[in-house]
Image: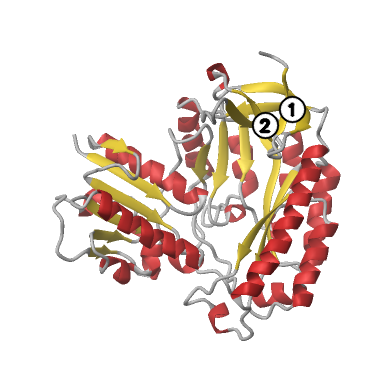
Amino acid sequence: MKKVSLHTLGCKLNFSETSAIARDFVKKGFERVKFGEKSDVVLINTCTVTETADKKCRQAIKKAKKISPNAFIAVTGCYAQDEAENIAKMPGVDVVLGNNEKFNFFKYVKSLEKKKNAVVYSCETNKINRFDAAFSSGDRTRSFLKVQDGCDYPCTYCIIPSVRGRSRSDTVEKTVEQAEKIASDGFKEVILTGVNIGDFGKGTNETFFDLIKGLDKVVGIERYRISSIEPNLITDEIIKFTIKSSKFLPHFHIPLQSGSDKILKLMKRRYNTSMFRKKIERINRLIPHAFLGIDVIVGFPGETDDDLNDTYKFLESLDISFLHVFSYSVRPGTPAEHLPDKVPRDVIKKRSGQLHQLSNIKHKAFYKRFINSEHKVLFERAKHKNSMYGFTENYIKVEVPYNKKLINEVKDFRITGINSNDIATGDLLDI
């Protein structure tokens, strides 16, 4: 039996797609092995959101060649879309598949013989127009469900619209069918993922609100989390639906990117800090126990110390739970590449450290609010020494002694404290 190893870099959307591709290999009679083990085929699903992501992609290709020198190596994903010809020149690579052909490995590859020169299939930006359904399975306790792809937002720092194409999605009916398949596999929690999921329904006359109403009815799925959603697309009806739904959890991941209106304008974001504040305060008021994770970029061209100070004070003033801090790196082909006043790397590093410290303060304060409160926790598969972890509805990480019977089970739990690793501890109430 031929062996295949797959490696994913980047976002949850990539994980959902790699898992779908893996199922296709298994159907074709391949045995899936871990990346890093010797195999006959290696498929690497890449990311290009940062310069670091590009570097990791190149490292993964070199690692695959070193471990399995005779393996047929295929590279796909966003870095493959953006730098197809350069990847094709890398030693060991046999085929490069653009994002539009990501799921067509067996359409193009009839023989697993190593090639003298790598072949590139469909990496033209204007050909990225199809939507391929995908969800993750087997890798984790939770499943990532792809509900949308592509983006129509022209943010000046972002390469994703040019490597993922325009916004598109399946119908509500077909997306619900995917969720039903996930339920039949025994998963109890689903994370909705995409490039710009709040934009669901382009071309189908449906909305993201229509989608969550449909998913809420799927039997077997007990919990849904909404992954990153633009602040201008979080409508009141979505917030209020989360309140009344027993399945959609009080957890929002919202990109801010900067707390300076000057920088937001340079980024061509579709809101200002005033609108963002109103959205956060609205969620705080209606769902006071909600976890709010906020994306922020430091070091965008033109960002001064005063701009960073504005961002810090703005975030400090908000009732939020966590910061996802990203250091800006130039993406060739984006408008920001040509902006003046680039910020030195050492300054970016310092600013990143400041915001990480603020995130730690916010995160600890959020956890401490819930000491002596009861929650429902879904426990995960992984064993860490003699412990296992789970997450509450509002995304508080919980640690308990390992018990195989708890895997993929939702249990009542009382938080009694926070340990030295900033993880919640407490008592199971229904075991």
Using the image as rendered, state which of residue 333 and residue 351 is in the foreground: 351
407 to 331, vertically: above or below: above
For residue 75, say whether it is visible: no
In the figure, 86 relative to 134: above or below? below
Q: Quadrant of residue 304?
A: bottom right
Q: Which mark is residue 30?
A: none
- The image position of residue 148, as x and y in percent, is 51, 52
Disc 1 marks a residue whose amino acid type is His
Check the image and report above or below for 387 versus 20: above
Q: Secondary structure at mark 2?
A: strand
Left or right: 366 in relation to 382 = right
The quarter in which the C terminus is drawn is top right
Image position, residue 388 (x, y; %): 58, 28
Q: Could you tell me if residue 426 is visible in this image?
A: yes
The residue where tag 1 is placed is 375
Residue 398 shows which numbered tag? 2
Q: Decide which of 248, 70 is in the foreground and name it.
A: 70
Q: How is the image coloured?
A: secondary structure
Q: Quadrant of residue 275?
A: bottom right
Image point (39%, 46%), residue name: 18
Q: Is residue 158 left or right of residue 121?
A: right
The amino acid type, in three-letter code, at marker 2 is Val
